[in-house]
Image (cartoon, rainbow, N blue to C red):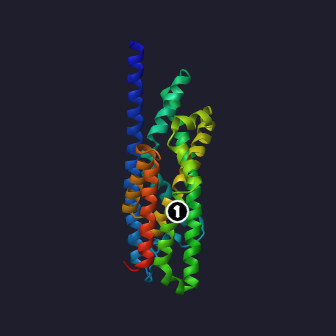
Amino acid sequence: MKDDGQSILTDSLIGRGVAIGLITTAALAWCASYFLMSSMVASDMGGVMGASSFPISDISMMFSSLSLVPMSLFVSMWVLGMMAMMFPALIPIVSIYHRAMEARGPSSGVDRLANVVAFLSGYLSLYALLGIVAYLAVFMALQTGAYIPELSQYGYAATGAVLIATGIWQLTPFKDRCLKNCVSPMGFLMTHDERGYTGALKMGAAHGYYCVGCCYMYMFVMLGVAAMSILSMAVLTVVVTLEKVIVKGASWFTWLVAVGFVAAGLVFVLVPGI
């Protein structure tokens, strides 16, 4: 009985430690994101910007070319934003992963921490890849808009289309399959368990794949519709955390979010300029 009580206490302390670590890291990422986004928008406002109904034009200087410097800056900011938004939702799986490492046998705290860092690095690598895709997509959209200025009149329709597509995507089998892997950390670890730092990196990348599958349309809404605003990040963080940690993929919540996005999209399409 004493051993059971000590085990429960240890699990509780581990859970709290992991939660504190991830929330602290997320808070620092929020601060860094706010500072960088404020600086970027101020820089854009100081430049010459044409009037446009595309929200992403507010940070258009970030997508100035395909050279390494602007792309690296964007991807770095993107990954910081993902740390801010996603780390709170990772508390359950990282806590269970840490406990699983302890259960395997004697290992130092430094070793377990290094494995957690490798897991998170693998996870973030998938969001970094998504960031590269997002950068290229926005760059091409802005270049097309520059060559065909008439497209700017369809900005609100494009915004509405993105929102409606996001609502429909909520109800797809792919989204559901990825979400099921995200909301069941124990099931994920049982089917993806690997040892060592390389194994932790691969496990993190696998979990990142499912997480990106759950959330990539949210990220495109944040980027293309809300121009990576801090408010949009906060709202989507609440949605993701509720979806993955609180309601755990409940169908009523999925439908609620889907209806919300479709309704918002219809407003942009039917009432342009609102």
Which quarter of the rendered picture does the N terminus lie within? top left
- Determine the residue positioned at 54% across, 60% down: 169
Closest to the observer: 72 or 217?
Answer: 217
The vertical placement of 121 against 6, above or below, is: below
Residue 157 at x, y percent in the picture: 48, 77
Nearer to us in this view, 258 or 84: 258
Compared with 217, 88 (above or below) is above
**Rendered residue at 38%/13% (across/down):** 2
Image quadrant assignment for residue 19: top left
> In which quadrant is the C terminus drawn?
bottom left
Residue that carries the numbered disc 1 in the rendered image: 168
Residue 54: percent from left, percent from top = 46, 76
* Residue 59 percent location from the top left of the image: 45, 71
What residue is at 42 percent from the left and 67 percent from the top?
Answer: 263
**Identity of the residue furthest to the bottom in this view:** 150
- Tell me, yes or no, if residue 83 can be seen here: no
**Outermost residue to the top:** 1
Is residue 94 among what the camera can see?
yes
Please give the count of numbered marks on the rendered protein.
1
58 relative position to 129: left or right: left
Instruction: Check the image and report above or below for 221 versus 49.
Output: above
SS label for mark 1: helix
Q: Mark 1, residues whose alpha carbon is within 10 Å: few (<14), some, or many (≥20)?
A: some
What type is the residue that disc 1 sits on? Ile
Q: Residue at x 43, y 78 (%)?
A: 270
